Image: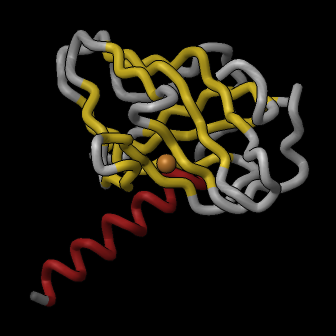
Amino acid sequence: MKPIRIALALAVAAALVSACSEAPQQTETAAAPDAPEGIAVANGRLMLPAVSGNPAAVYFDVSNDGESNRMIRAVSVQGAGESTLHVTNDAGMQEVLQVSVPAGETVKFEPGGTHVMAMDVADTLVAGGQTEVTLTFVGGDKVSFPADVRAAGDER
Ligand SMILES: [Cu+2]
């Protein structure tokens, strides 16, 4: 199993190097230069928890106008700790390891459906402000987009 471990370590190292060389992006509807072809994100918003210390929820619409199916495998939220992909189904809410974005489709992260949970929200995230969310796709491509920070009772 050792060669596999080494390959994995190299892949992680390569990912770290490319992450460090990324220039900060300030675009309105996402699409960083290294975003997967055809991927765009709109309507980003982060709902602060009603009770401080609880996780925040992040919603957005991710569209894939490219030729290839894409798979989101990680998410990070500026100003929050660990963030995970969640789905809501009959059994309640559960974490999923990836979310597919098929070619030609728009996937909505929305209340009662697929969403992002962000733990350990910093008090620098206040209603009326904005933060940045980054999705990482299988293969390592990333897209970053702005999310409006909203109070727990605001429109989701
Ligand atoms: Cu959740």
Location of residue 136 (image quadrant)? top left
Q: Is residue 94 left or right of residue 132?
A: left
User: Which quarter shows the N terminus?
Assistant: bottom left
The residue at 81%/33% (across/down) is 151
Observer able to see residue 38: no
Q: Where is residue 77 shown, x and y percent of the image?
A: 64, 46
Q: Residue furthest bottom?
A: 2
Location of residue 37 (image quadrant)? top left
Observer able to see residue 26: yes
* Residue 22 vertical position relative to residue 68 in the rendered view, above or below: below
Q: Nearer the viewer, residue 115 or 49?
A: 49
The residue at 84%/43% (across/down) is 125
* Residue 137 vertical position relative to residue 38 in the rendered view, above or below: below
**Number of dots carrying numbers:** 0
Location of residue 131 (image quadrant)? top right
The residue at 61%/52% (across/down) is 118
Q: Where is residue 141 shown, x and y percent of the image?
A: 39, 39
The residue at 44%/29% (across/down) is 35
Q: Where is residue 19 shown, x and y percent of the image?
A: 54, 52
Q: Is residue 155 left or right of residue 116?
A: right
User: Which quarter shows the C terminus?
Assistant: top right
